Amino acid sequence: MTDLKKLTRAMTFAAQKHTDQRRKGERAEPYVNHLIEVVDLLVQHTGGADIDLLCAGMLHDTVEDTKTTREELVREFGENVADIVMECTDDKSLPKAERKRLQIVNAPHKSDAAKMVKMADKISNLKTILTSPPPDWTEDRKQEYFAWAKQVVDGCRGVNKGLEAEFDTVFKKGVKQFGMAA
């Protein structure tokens, strides 16, 4: 299978799995927009040569947010893609606060590929909070999310200067917009 075919299969797979999901923001964009933005960030900052990385970026929420299994990802996209996705997957049986704590604790121990997917994911999420925040989120909640995302990304640093710089730029916009301490 060609690299491009593998990537477009991952895009189709993710779009089908997330078909009825919307972002939580005011505009309630289709969830697939987030996944495409994650892949775009990865392409921009890595050159796009690692198709497994791009596929994992597209699929990073399938196990966590749909009925997709690791075995299904292995069958469709191979062990490497499935491994990266699983590294990015929270255990939804745990309380939200514990999942968030574990993202901070585990970030430094992830593979380079999983760290890049995590950074791209957080960049996309912060951009959305800046442009289309969930309508029920207070300024405090937005600030808390930004601060938490920074802790996760700080644990991912050292693998891609471009993603790190883009995160820092978006984070600084949040500091300014929400009056946060830097």
Image (tube, helix red, strand yellow):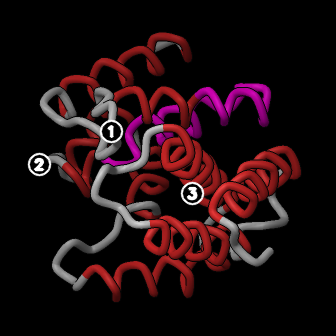
Q: State which tag comes first along the sequence, 1 or 2.
A: 1
Type of amino acid at the residue the image marks with label 3: Lys
In which quadrant of the rendered view does residue 174 lie? bottom right
Q: Label for residue 26?
A: 1
Callout 2 secondary element? loop
In which quadrant of the rendered view does residue 33 lie? top left
Q: Label for residue 67?
A: 2
Q: Position of residue 87 (x, y in %)?
A: 46, 64
Q: Disc 1 vs disc 2: Cβ atoms closer than 8 Å?
A: no
Q: Which secondary structure dominates the residues rendered in magenta?
A: helix
Question: Which stretch is magenta?
Answer: 40-61
Distance from Cα at disc 3 to Cα at disc 1:
23 Å
Relative to 6, 116 lies left or right: right
Disc 3 target residue:
118
Q: Disc 3 vs disc 2: Cβ atoms closer than 8 Å?
A: no
Q: Which mark is nearer the camera, 1 or 2? A: 1
Q: Is residue 115 above or below residue 103?
A: above
Type of amino acid at the residue the image marks with label 1: Glu
Callout 3 secondary element? helix
